[in-house]
Amino acid sequence: MKREPFVIERMYNAPVERVWKAITDKNEMKQWYFDIAAFKPEVGFEFQFEGNDGSKTFLHLCKITEVIANRKLTYSWRYDGFAGNSFVTFELFPEAGKTRLKLTHEGLETFPQDNPSFAKKNFEIGWTELISSLLKNHVEQVSVEK
């Protein structure tokens, strides 16, 4: 059983503070990630959301384990009713007015391997769309404040 985490890195044409807000503000998260009822970037804060793999809806149960403002956010990620626990880490690196984001999802092998919904390729597809497309478009759009 491989214990290799899924890792993706992308560069965004947006300052670190903008990207941090996008990954820690529930109103922003709703626009590119999931609709989360409550979220606070505080260690110990627990949150949940529903995600669909195209055929089933899963209740995700998460708990924040590490926060370094504008630099790092880690939370546990598991599924209600299923064995396994994983960790998602967002790391932000400022580079000349832009932000390099590194996302690591480790512990995928702890989920039931006989369930095709938990196949690593599904996480790769999902995170790639979220990080390469949805989050990128969200933080790079010019927002008009009213």
Image (tube, rainbow, N blue to C red):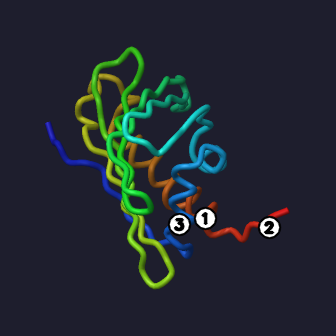
Front: mark 3 or 2 = 3
Q: Is residue 22 above or below residue 75?
A: below
Q: Give the mark nearest the N terminus, 3 or 2.
A: 3
Query: Residue 91 appears in which quarter of the rendering?
Result: bottom left
- Quarter of the image with the C terminus is bottom right
Q: Is residue 61 above or below residue 143?
A: above
The structure residue drawn at horizontal position 51% and vertical position 59%, both measured from the top left corner, is: 20
Q: Is residue 11 above or below residue 3?
A: below
Residue 76 on image: x %, y %: 34, 36
Give residue 139's mark.
1
Cα separation between marks 1 and 2: 13 Å
**As shown in the figure, which amino acid type bears the numbered disc 3?**
Glu
Residue 80 on image: x %, y %: 42, 19
The residue pinned by badge 3 equals 17
Give residue 144's mark.
2
Q: Give the mark nearest the N terminus, 1 or 2.
A: 1
Cα separation between marks 3 and 2: 17 Å
**As shown in the figure, which amino acid type bears the numbered disc 2?**
Val
Residue 121 on image: x %, y %: 36, 43
